[in-house]
Structures are given as C-alpha cells and as structure tokens.
Image: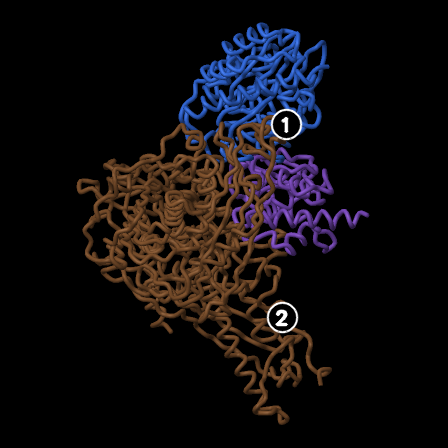
Amino acid sequence: MTRIEVTVNGVRRDAEVEPRQLLVYFLRETVGLTGTNVGCDTSSCGACTVLLDGESVKSCTLLAVQSDGREVTTIEGMASDGEFHPLQEAFHRNHGLQCGYCTPGMIMAAASFLHENPTPTEEQVREALEGNLCRCTGYQNIVKSILDAAGQMSGVKA
Amino acid sequence: MGDTRVRERTRGGIGEDVARIDGLPKSKGAFAYASDLWADGMLWGHTLRSPHPHARIRSIEISAAVASPGVHAVLTAEDVPGKKTYGLEFADQPVLAWDRVRYVGEPVAIVAAEHPELARRAAARIVVDYEVLPAVTDMKEALEPDAPKVMEFGNVLRHVRIVHGDPDADADVWVEGYYETGMQDQAPLGPEAGLAVPAEDGGIDVYVATQWLHVDRQQMAPCLGLPMEKVRVYLAGVGGAFGAREDVSMQIHASMLALHTGKPVKMSYGRAESFLGHVHRHPSRIWMRHGATRDGRLVNIRARLLLDGGAYASSSTAVTGNASTFACGPYEVPNALIEGTGVYTNNPPCGAMRGFGAVQACFAYEAQMDKLAAVLGIDPIELRLKNALSTGSVFPTGQVIDGTAPVREVIERCAAIPLPPEEPTGPATRDPITVPGGAQNVGHGEGLKRGVGFAAGYKNTAFSEGFDDSSEAWVRLSAGPAGPLVEIRSAAAEVGQGVYTILTQIARSELGVERVILDPSDTNIGSAGSSSASRQTMMSGGAVQLACGAVREALFERVRAREASSDPAGELRLEAGQVLESELPLGPIERFLDEPIEETRVFHHRPTEPIDERGQGAIHVSFAFAAERAVVEVDEDLGLVRVIQIAAAQDVGSALNPRSVEGQIEGGTAQGLGLALMEELQVVDGRIRNASFTDYLIPTILDMPPVVSVLVEEPEPGVPYGAKGVGELSTIVAGAAVAAALRNATGRELNRIPVKPDDLVGLAEPPTSSGPPAAPDVPGPRSVPEYFGLGAGQMEILANDADDA
Amino acid sequence: MDVLLPRTLEEALEMKAAKPEALPIAGGTDVMVELNFDLHRPEALIDICRLPELREWKRENGMIFLGAGVTYGRIMRELSELTPLTQASRTVGSPQIRNRGTVGGNLGTGSPAGDALPVLAAYDAEIELASANRARSVRWNEFHVGVKKTALEPDELILGARWRAVRGPGSFSKIGTRNAMVISVAGLCLVMDDDARAVRVALGSVGPTVLRASEAETFVAEELTRSGNWDDPGADLPVDAMGAFAERVAAAARPIDDVRGTAAYRRHACAVLARRALGWALAARREGVGRP
C-alpha cells in the first residue's frame, strides 16, 4: 500500500492505496464518487474523463498514486453551493443526454475545453470532443448543450 | 363569461419538449448505473468462457480455483439448481456449458471472490479439458448436409417462405443483386452489470441493467429452481441497450453465486467481456431480383435472405421473420417470393439490435431500387414515389396496411431538405479537419468527390406474429402536501430512450396534474414488455393512459356525487390542477382527494396472426416509415469518408416529445452510419478479433454530421395519441443512405457494409456469390426448435403471467 | 505490484538499477491499457512523470532535445514551429490522451503505430538513454529492433530524443478508418532538408518498426537536383517523378494484413500520402514557408 495525498473536488484526502489501483477506481470505490463511469478500459471512450490540475485526462489509464499531491475534479465537483454548473443545466435543458453514461465525461471534457476557449464555434466544440464517445445521441444535442453553456457562462462573466 | 374560463394549461404534457426527468441526476453524476451498485460484504463474480468455437468438454477441474485466495464459490453446470438452459425464444442456451461448447466466449464456469482481481485469477486456474470439434462458422456452409451440426436437430433455426401474388409474373426489366452485411455490435457505453442479493425467504433480489425485467425473471427462475415470486428483478441504471440487454447476460450467474454463498454478488463486465457477453446484429447475405415495367412500376420481387444466428437462438427466429417480411421495402409490389433462413453456426450468438432484421433488408432493397432507377433511366426518388406504399396497400404477407402510411410524404419532405453548400475541392483548398480523415491530416482537398444517396424504409412497432406483448401500469392520484400528485408504477425499462419522461407527460395530460413521480421499475408489477421493437411509448404509454383514464373516471364519480351544483350533463375535464365543468372551474383537484385513487390497467395492442405455410397473415401491429438522404465526401485516393449531412424525414404518427424524437433520429442515424462505414465485429474461425473500443470503431463526434430532421405527423388510428414507435427507423435507413451516397460518389458497386477503404479505392473486389443456398427442408413456417419440442421462452412466459393475474 | 515514485532522475536511475524489472510509466496511455487487459503483469512500475529532467525540451547548437516526459499537448502548444511533430501530436488519441501521453511512451512501447515515431525517424533522431552509471545515445533505427522490441537495457531509462534542427518544410499524415481517435493504419512523415539537399520519408504501421524509404529519398533528391528545384523552388518536378517517388515509397513498406487494415491498402496509402506530402513540401518551398 502506498500513502497518497490528493485533493478531490476541493477536499484534501489522505489515503492508503494499492499501487496498481487506477485513479477511476480510487474515485469510485475509495472516495465513493461513482459519477465517473468506466466504459472501455482502453482510454477510448472518455466516460472516465476527470480533470487533473485542471486538465482533462482519462482516469482509467492513470494510477491513483500518480495523482499524489495533485488536484482532481470529478463531475460531483462541478456544482457549487447547490448550484448546478451551467454545463449540467445545459445538458439537461437541451436533451444533451439519453442513457447518460457518457455525460459526466462529456461535461468534464467540455469544461476543460471551455476554460481554454470560452466562446467556441460549433466546429471547435466538435473538435474538442473527439475523445468522448456517445452511443445514444448522435452528438447533436451535446454540441447544442455546450454552445448553450458557453453562452450562459460568458454571459455570467460579462 | 370568457373571463372566468381557466386559461391555464397543464404544463409538461404530451407534445411538449419536456426535459428528461433523469436529466439532472445524470448530468450531476448522481444517477446510479448498474455498475455503481454496491452492498455490504458483497463478492465479485467472474465468468470463465470457452476459448473454442466448438469443443467437447471432457472434464473441468476446479480444485485449484477453489483453493485460490479470497474465493467463495466456483460453480459449473452441475451446480445449476434448476433447468440447465435458458433462452429468449427457446431454452437452447446452457446457463453454463456441459458436454459441449458452441462458441468462443460461451460461459463454462463462474467464480465468486472477494475482489474482482481475485475472482479473475481463480478463474484462470480452472482447468477445462476440451476436445476440439470441427466448427461451422460460415452461414451458407451451415446449410450443407455434411456440415457439423450445432444442434442435434440441425442448423436451421427458421425458414420463412412468403408467396405473394404470382411469383412467376413476368416483368419488362429485371435487376439482380447480391448483398452482405457484417456483424454489428450494439456497443452500449455501459457494459453489462448487476447485483444479486440473497433474500431471507430463500429467494433472490436482482438489480440489473436490462431491457425487460419480466423476461429476465422468467428465464432466471426455472434455472435457479425458484418459484417466480421468489425472483424479484429491479431495474438498475442502464447505460444504453439497443438490443444488447434483451437477452440474459450475468443475471443467472450472479444469482447462482449469491444463492450458493449467501452473500450479495456483483458482476460487472469490462468492455472486452461485454463483446462476448451479449448478442450482436446478424450478419446477412441477401440475393434479390426486382422486376418492373418500363415506366418504373414494380411487378415482382424475388428475395432470398440468409442470417447467421450464431450458436444459440436468442431472438434469431423473430429477426428472420422481420428481415423476410420487410424485404420488399416500403413499396407496392403485386407479386413476390421471399425466402428467409436463419441458421445456427459456431459464431457468437446474434439477436436483437436496433432495426431487428429490417436493417439488413433495407440495405439490399434500397440498393436494388437505385439499380432499377439506373436501368430505367428514372430519377431514384421518382421511382420510389411511383411505387410508394400507402394506406390500403397490401403487404407481402397479405396484410392490408390499414394505418397511416405517409411514404410519399417522408420521401418528398426528406428530398426537399436543402442540400449543404458545395465546398471547394482540389489541393490546398481545405483545412484537413474538414476533409475525410479529419484529425489525421491526410489531405487539403485532394481527390474529393461528393455523393448523395437516398433510402426509404419501414418497420413494425411492437411484437408480431401473434405475440401479445402487453404492458401493465398502476397510477395513483393523491392530495400531496403541495397539491395533487400522480404516482406511476410501470416495469418499463428506461434504457436512455426517454420512456420515463413520456409516461410522466401522459399522466400530466390525462390528469391535468403537473406533479408526477415515477416509482422504480421492478417485477412487483406486471410486465411492461420489452424496451425494444420501438414499442414502449405505444405500449406502456398506452397502459399509463388507460390507468389514468380509470383514475379520472373514479375522480369524476366523486365530483358528481359531492358537488350539488354539478350539472349531470356538463362535461368534466381536468386541467392545470383544476376540475372543470363545461370549461368552468369547479375547484382544485385535491378537494376530491381525501382518499387517493389507484387504478391498474393492462394495455394490449391489437392481436396479430402467426405466419402461415405460404407466409401469409396479418402479422404486424403498426407500420412506420422513414427516409434519409446522406451527403458524403469521399477521398477517392485514400478511400476515406466524411459524411457532410444527413437529412431525415420520419413518420412518427404524433410526436409526444419532439426533441426526444429528434434525439432518437439523430442517435439511430449514428448507428446506421457506423454500420455503413466502420462497425464490424471481425469474426474469423468463430473468434472475434476486435473485441475492444480500440478496434471496434463506433462513430466519434467528427464522424457524425448534423442531422436535419422533419417529423411527419399523421396520427395512427387505434394507438395511444396516434404515436408510432420512433426508435429504430433512422438506423434502418441511415446505413442504406450512406452506402448509396458512397456509390454515387465513386461509381462502385459497394454491395457489402461496412464499406472499407479498400472497397472505395478498388483494391478489394465486391463480394460475389455462387447463388443462394437451396431452401432447407423444414417442418413448417414457425421456428424449427418449436417442432423439436424445445421449451419456448416468451410465449410460455406470458401465458404464466396471465395465469398469475 | 509496486509503484516506484522517484522525484529526480538520479533517484529514478538508482531505483531502476536496483529493480530493473520495473516498467517505466509516464502518461500511462499505452502501459495502463495493457495492464487493464491483464496482458502484462509487471512486478513493478516506475512512475517517471515527475522527473523535471524528462519534462523539458531545448534548442542548443542547432540541435533540438525533446524530453521523454514532454506531453503531446505541450508539444502542440510549445513547439508549433516543428510542423511534422506538431501534426503527429495532433493525431494522437484525443485531448485527454495528449494531456498525458509522451514521446517517451511511444519510444518505450515501440509499436510501429506510435504516432511520433515516424517523425523522429525522419529527423534522424538519436534516442538518449541513461542508467545509474552510464549514458548513451542510439540512433532511432538501432533503438527499435522489432515489433515492440527496443535496445533499452533493463537498468536504463529513456531521457528523450535529440536531432539536428532541419531547415525546410515537412508534414505528418496518418490513415485511420474513422475521422478521430484511431490507431494508425499507415503513417507518413516527410521532411525536406534544404541544407543537406535531402528528403527524408519515414513510414509508420507498415512494418515491424518504423521504416525509412531510403531509395525513394535518394531518388527524389536527385530528381530535385535534376529539375533545379533545390536552387529554384519555383522549378517544377516532372509529374512522373512524383509518381515514381510515390511508388518507391510504397515499395519500402513491409505491411501485413491485420484487424485494422490490409497490407494492400497500407501500401497503396503510403503511395498516396507520399505524393501528397511531397506536393505540400514543394508548394511550401515555392511559397517560402518553412524557411527561416
């Protein structure tokens, strides 16, 4: 077992982890945050996307020990003070999900992208989400949701 | 007087773009999928699977596995407490193989241990002594007399022969074609998972991601040796289904391990195991001959279809029926001979996937229509319009299409959607991200050809051929703390398609109450039937509508009994929380709800007939139609493709939630596009070579163009709100439309999907055939296993449920 | 299984010397997939993510050094003037993978489908290796000796790659059967070296290791000389010379049929990509792009 210290959604956690434990299972089983889903085990589908020090990563190909000393944000960390993140509301409002299994990863990938590019075009949104598979929606309402959220967020900032 | 009328309308009812009731939990990460299930002290199950497509099991040695650390149980076929086989239509599939394995991936033993890793390691220590047997892995060879037999009674699952009009009728012009489709996987994003918890009464509580709780239970209980009421199945969060969850996967295994150990057992497949753990879309070979008059009227169609059902029946017999009955396309044809055969092979089992046989048929008949148009020199859309089915047309099984059939409308309205603007082609004209190859930087505009393809198609809503797939619903209306409250209970599986939201919309409209809650789906209420065959809105929506109607009638009785002022002739209505009489408010609904009102109702669709010896019968409930047009860009040098736009027009009857319907069209289109361009399980000698998301490719966001959709609304008589099923049609037509567009761009034959780069650049010859196989000798038009006394699956089930009631 | 977590290169090399079986892991985008599938059960991993020495790139004396731990995301942001390398980085996986995946991972895994490898081959890169008691560098083609086989000694770590900065245009292209997030079916990097008057072409996914199309390189350099293009970028290369070059590139491929594509298609794609890449490079020279 290895001792790690990681900040998850703003809360510092000290934990003993199996060295070979993946970050996603640390989050799901040790921390109890099951919002991050596992869809493929090959870093193909993006369902397990979380932010590591603000950058999107696929948590199925990262060891928990590699997050030592770093900051992890999961879908559960997106709402603050009981307020949904604009992306969460936008996915709800725009039918940006069906089964929803890809949604947490989509939202995390989108959050990372909107941080880099707060006012994207539709094409830029599509390019940014190349690493997240959705089997239900055909992506159309996901793109709408992200553009809607971008509008809301830049509106909020202004 | 107008001033006193209630102007307010109930919000969130049918016809509105109501946001999904699970939208916020799912976008918060708070929605519990089956893979999130957890119980104190639970064990993890793991399945040992066959490495051979066909082998005799000489012995299974489990002692090393039993002695492995953390292991609580290692079970084989002899530990199955009850019936040793199960199956959706026929119980031909062993819970755990004994004597023989018939496909690579067939479960042979199961292990429960304290950690998934420990279970995996223990399973690796089980020694199975196999005697490898000759396997049959080619669907045509399976019909040859000397082929290895997958089942003792042979390799034919079903042979359907439909004789329509005069199959010898002559025509001015004939076109012939041979077509193949590959094995597609549903690839729902959430792999199979569930949790079985032993109950104090000796029964079992199973939480699972499934499409049909009751059919799971009906297969589980006999195998577990338990009475039906001791097997309780609860719907866990479903990460997509598309047919993959219609068959049992881990349900019986986890239950056996839980009953054996007395502990909760969770099983959660990884992606690689998921590819082995569910059925796939049938690969097909189709021979067609279309005869027409010189002015383009279809006269006669000869169709021969062969479907590879793999090692066990699953729903292959029904898929064979569907592929065959829809083989002529949504066109009037006075004469036809259609023969469809589903066969057993030692390939992975195939069964339900979105489109259910109609997908394969559509690829073939639409290619034939384009061929015919070319030979006749008629515009392909004109040819389709000329032959379009309409109300009153006769289906090849002799069934008169008495519902709405706006085939012309979907074709015309799809064709009228504006084409996307032309884009520049030629070297140095384009950003690589916008050309075929996308993110891979293979071109700047070189070698590009645009193509446009069109396809129309159709399919039935709900189950066919005499099957009564009814749905039950319970509705309760009470005075909640914040006004009237409707509670709905239904066993309908929400698999992502949005049925839960639709059920609440129906209740709002029927009862004029906005606060509606839905209980979790489980087997404590009667069956809702499957979340498949585009049927849940019609069937469970119908059940909720009936139950709400009964609740409303009971409420109106109270109103009339209590309201002295009530005019017995006045028409009562519920709207926005008010009881209205002749459009004037009588008072809030909750005033009449000192006692709650509860009603349970079962909705049946109209009866259908089984197919007879000549393939005749009114076998389907309702037909829905769609057309799509694909615009593609092909890099002719590299054989890479970018789909630029999909235009879609769909006959939806009436759209109860238009945004949700559009979402179905968009998502279904993506799966059809995937089939046309990239999705194929590559099975060689019975082995899947690409069981991962690294090599089984599904469309990314850069593969999927915007879909422009038009909903054609002509309410279907005799079904709730006139709403037709909407889930499958876009998958059926999208693949055919994309393939047609590729043909249009390249001039190549492209008679097999998925189309590969090799096909587009001419490196691979189109598949050819030495001709269709001879019709097999079968006892009759029904499923062959039936004639050999194999226990039927669903039929038996519904009869039992009827007895219970 | 242990995971060693060194903080400095020195510490890492000592750990590797003490535990040579430890498998280095950085982004984990290759290694973890194998671990997840149980294809590989290393006794130990050594996480080299945090070694500052591996996370740097620098230019010195006309050479470029790219640390093994520089992610593809950083390459795209920080090294955009190295067009082929940036283009190859863009074709790696997805943003999430590029935020983690490193050139060192491509080198260590040694798959011929590693997207950065054709670029290193076209740059004629030296791979720098170190153990606790020695450092050495190995030319790219001596480093990868077979499918997923490298010349790395058990006590060594990959420090990075070093190559002479090239003056001249170049590009990287990759074939995949969908438009994003796909493993290479064939990849091609073409680099023109104006100073050496050479063209270098490397191919990925069409042989057991990344290959150079040497004969095609010599042929096209001579054709460019013959046409006067080296001195006058406006001088056209004869059309049939383009075709002959493409054929020679395809002939250098040693492809196989596998689940991702056929040998015939891979060879064909090499020819198409070669012709296109040369066309782009000549056009860039004509327009003065890629010149200092």
Q: Chain of mark 2?
A: B
How crowded pointer 1 is (Cα within 10 Å; few <14, some 14-19, many 20+) is rated as many
Under circle 1, the secondary element is helix
Q: Chain drawn blue, letter?
A: C
Q: Amino acid at mark 2?
A: Arg
**What number is the disc on residue C72?**
1
Left or right: B89 in relation to A119 = left
Q: Height in image: A70 above or below B792? A: above
Quarter location, residue C259:
top left
Q: Where the C terminus of chain C falls, by quadrant?
A: top right
List x then y, in percent, for residue C100.
62, 31
Alpha carbon separation for disc pair 1 and 2:
51 Å
Q: Chain drawn purple, letter?
A: A
Colour in which chain B is drawn:
brown
Q: Amino acid at mark 1?
A: Tyr
**What number is the disc on residue B515?**
2
**Residue shown at the point (34%, 49%) measured from the top left:** B294
Q: Nearer the viewer, residue A76 or B317?
A: B317
Left or right: B274 in relation to A112 = left
Q: Height in image: C245 above or below B373? A: above
Q: Would residue B205 be seen by someone viewing this image from the given angle?
A: no
List x then y, in percent, for residue B281.
39, 47
